[in-house]
Structure formats: C-alpha cells, structure tokens
Amino acid sequence: MARLASQMKMGYYKTPEAVVHQIKKILNIQSGARLLDTCCGEGEALSIIASGTEAITYGMELDKERHDTASKVLDNAVWGDSLYELRASRKGFNLLWLNPPYDLEKGDYDQKSERLEIRFLERQWDLLADKGVLVYIVPFDSVKKCSSFLKRRCSNLVILSFPLTEYSHFKQVVLICTKGKPVKGEAEHNISIFDSLDTMEFWEVPELLKTTEDAGPLYRYDVSASDDDIYFRSVRLNPDEAVKKIDKSPLWDRVMQRFSPALNGAKINPLMPLREGHLAMLLASGMMNGEVTGNNGSRLIVKGSVKKEVVCSHEETEDMDKYIETDRYAITVRAICIDPLEIITIK
C-alpha cells in the first residue's frame, strides 16, 4: 500500500528555514499559546516559530531518530503516526503547523484513493481551537483539492507561494487561515481564491501569487492563548520514555525489593546440590564463562557453547526405506588450564 511505502520513506519534505522565518513574520503569537506540529520532523520549524515567545510547543513524529532530535527542542514531543496513534484534546491548540507527507493513500477495496495531504488536514482540523490559525504547507496541486473541505470552514484565507528558488524544488505553497465559519460573503471570497488556482499552471505560481517573502507587511494573524487543560500523547510505546518513568516510580523500587532483596554480603546456595547435567547446561549457556578455580586449586578459563546438528539415520522395512533427520544440540565445553598449560575440550 502507498501508506506503507510512505511510512518507509516517511514522506519527509523539510520546510526551508528561510520560509519558516518569513511565515513567522505573519504570526502574532501570544504568551501561553499552544503550537502543534503533527509531522514535526526534527522540530526545527516549530522551534523557530516559537522562538522569542512564551508559547508551548507540541510535536509528533513517525521517525524515531527525528523524534529524539525534536524532543530536545520542543516542549512536548511524542513518537508515532499522527493519523492513527495521536490522542490529543479536541480544539486544544491555537496554531496547527501542518506540513504532511506528500503521497497517495490507497483505500480498501470499497474506498477511493486519497491524497495523504488531504487526509491529514481532515483528521487534524478538529485539534485546532476555534479562531485558531492553520499553516498548511503542501504542493500546489494538492492545495486545490482541499477547496471543498476549507471553503466554508475558515476565514481570512490566503494562499502564498514559496519564493521562486524554494518553489522550484517541490512546487509548494502555504495556505494560512483562521478556523471559524466565514461571515457573509467571505465563503464566496474563499471559493474565488480556490477557483483562481484552476487557471494557473504550476510554473506561473510564484509570479501570480504573493510569496512568503513579500507577505510579512501585508498579512497578520493573531495566535491567542488558551488556559484549559489538555492531553497530548501517543498510543505507541516509546521504550526510552517508559524506562525514564519506571526509574522515577516508587512502585518499581518496591517491586525490586521483593525480587532482588538486599543480601548484605550473604551467599545464596541452591536448595539442592547441582547435578552434572545442571553444570553442563550452565557451562553451555555461557553463564559460567570465565575463570573457574577447582577444588584442588587449579585455575581454568572456561567457555561453553551449544550448536544445533542434524543426525541422519536410515531404516528399512518390507514396504519402504525411511531416511530420518533428527535435530540435536551438541554441547561443547572448552577450557584452558593455566598450570599446567593445556587446552581441554569436552563434548
């Protein structure tokens, strides 16, 4: 499926740093505003947007290595697929920075194929608070496909082109709007903006649309703050975070006290003496590798190993010949005797 292929390459198209700084000039971010990037990569874009403000940053990333980097620059970062594994408060965030994977997701046998860019928008629009700001970064061909979803759900709509140099790489544009039902006449204005895109060829976009480079003095979007409690987590288990939480848990200390009691220097002997078979298993498993001192004071360096072998046998009956292959495990113990110096092999 296209989704699996996209997960393998992660559909990762990093927003150029210059463009991020240009978009930042359009945003007026209040202290305490919650900024969300559901495909945050290494967290660079959102950290730039939040720099110099007292906003709180939230990011989710599918690639583990990029997530680990993002967790160092964002206030909150979780690991997982934000289409299926993100659990976050509805209308909990004041800015949604959305630069999703660029790919086609094939539906099931009774469903149509759908662009991932549109699927991310539809799934995560609900996370944006009323009057929150959407920054949607997608290829030019994809932004035209979101018309039916956005035209009656947003106000203050503007579509900007990447500057010519950056646009030439992936043909990207930036859609910025405020979440909320458009006032009278504004829905028609939104429709006219999307309709105008149909008359453009992709190479004309930087000339016919305003670019992010020129938009700073022309547009202004207020990103307000919210004070309600929210939740933000992934259903995917992050082992690194689990270990950190376990280390801080008082319950873990009590469990370890039960299973690993303090010995205070005392030696623990088995309830019954070990038999030769037990010793052979310990040696073969590697549990007794190292230096061993015998009862007579001799010193041995011991190394055990187990190797799987196939034993072939042949049986004849009145009707047929049988050739039987049987798996068995050969145990080998090798030791270097220090004094006198010799190598001992036991199989």
Image (spheres, rainbow, N blue to C red):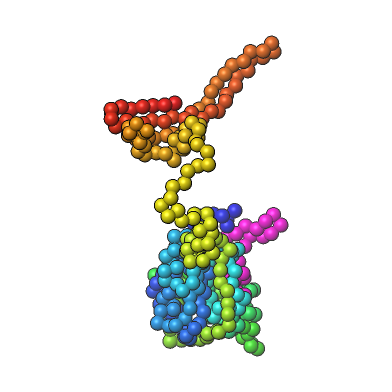
Q: Position of residue 245 (x, y in %)?
A: 50, 65
Count the marks.
Answer: 0
Above or below for 74 versus 256: below
Is residue 109 on the magenta stretch? yes
> What residue is drawn where x is 50% and y is 77%?
35
- 179 and 268: which is toward the camera: 268
Q: Position of residue 173 (x, y in %)?
A: 49, 72
Q: Is residue 210 visible?
A: no
Q: Is residue 330 visible?
A: yes
- 109 and 77: which is toward the camera: 77
In the picture as drawn, the residue positioned furthest to the bottom comes out as 184
In the picture as drawn, the residue positioned furthest to the right comes out as 110
Left or right: residue 135 versus residue 213 is: right
Above or below for 43 versus 236: below
Where the C terminus falls, by quadrant? top left
> What residue is drawn where x is 60% and y is 21%?
324
Left or right: residue 210 versus residue 299 is: right
State which quadrant residue 345 falls in: top left
- 59 and 111: which is toward the camera: 59
Q: Position of residue 255 (x, y in %)?
A: 54, 59
> What residue is drawn where x is 39% and y is 70%?
165
Above or below for 308 versus 219: above
- Which stretch appears magenta? 104-127
Is residue 105 on the magenta stretch? yes
Q: Position of residue 296 (x, y in %)?
A: 34, 31
> What residue is drawn where x is 43% and y is 87%?
217
